[in-house]
Amino acid sequence: MKEGIYFFRPPDREEHSDVSFYDIATGQSTRVFTVERPVYNHMAISPDRRTIIYRQFDESGSDLMLVENFH
């Protein structure tokens, strides 16, 4: 399993943010997926790295999102 850090890239003009992974061994960052709504800068990764949970601003009143099997 790769060692690294998952992080949000700064949002673009449309408030879309990429969740990326920084691989410590190679020094390379790769995009995992794009979030198309404004997000808060906190996320959690499951120990098996198959699920990410993060908060996003949503007009419907929900601000908790779950992403499963993103690999």
Image (cartoon, rainbow, N blue to C red):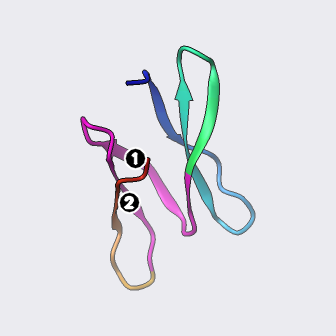
Residue extending furthest toward the left: 47
Report the front residue among 43 and 30: 30
Residue extending furthest toward the right: 13
Magenta span has 17? no
Q: Quadrant of the N terminus?
A: top left
Mark identifier at residue 55: 2
Residue at 45% in and 55% down: 40
Q: Quadrant of residue 3?
A: top left
Which amino acid, mark 2?
Arg
* Figure check: 29 above or below 66: above
CB of mark 1 within 8 Å of CB of mark 2?
A: yes
Q: Secondary structure at mark 2?
A: strand
- Count of numbered badges drawn on the protein: 2
Report the front residue among 53 and 39: 53
Residue at 26% in and 37% down: 48
Judged by its main secondary structure, the magenta piece is strand
Mark identifier at residue 42: 1
Residue extending furthest toward the top: 25
Which amino acid, mark 1?
His
Q: How many neighbours does mark 1 have within 10 angstroms: few (below 14), some (14-19), or many (20 or more)?
A: few
Q: How many neighbours does mark 2 have within 10 angstroms: few (below 14), some (14-19), or many (20 or more)?
A: some
Residue extending furthest toward the bottom: 60
Q: Which residues are magenta?
A: 33-58
Q: Quadrant of residue 44?
A: top left
* Figure check: 27 above or below 43: above
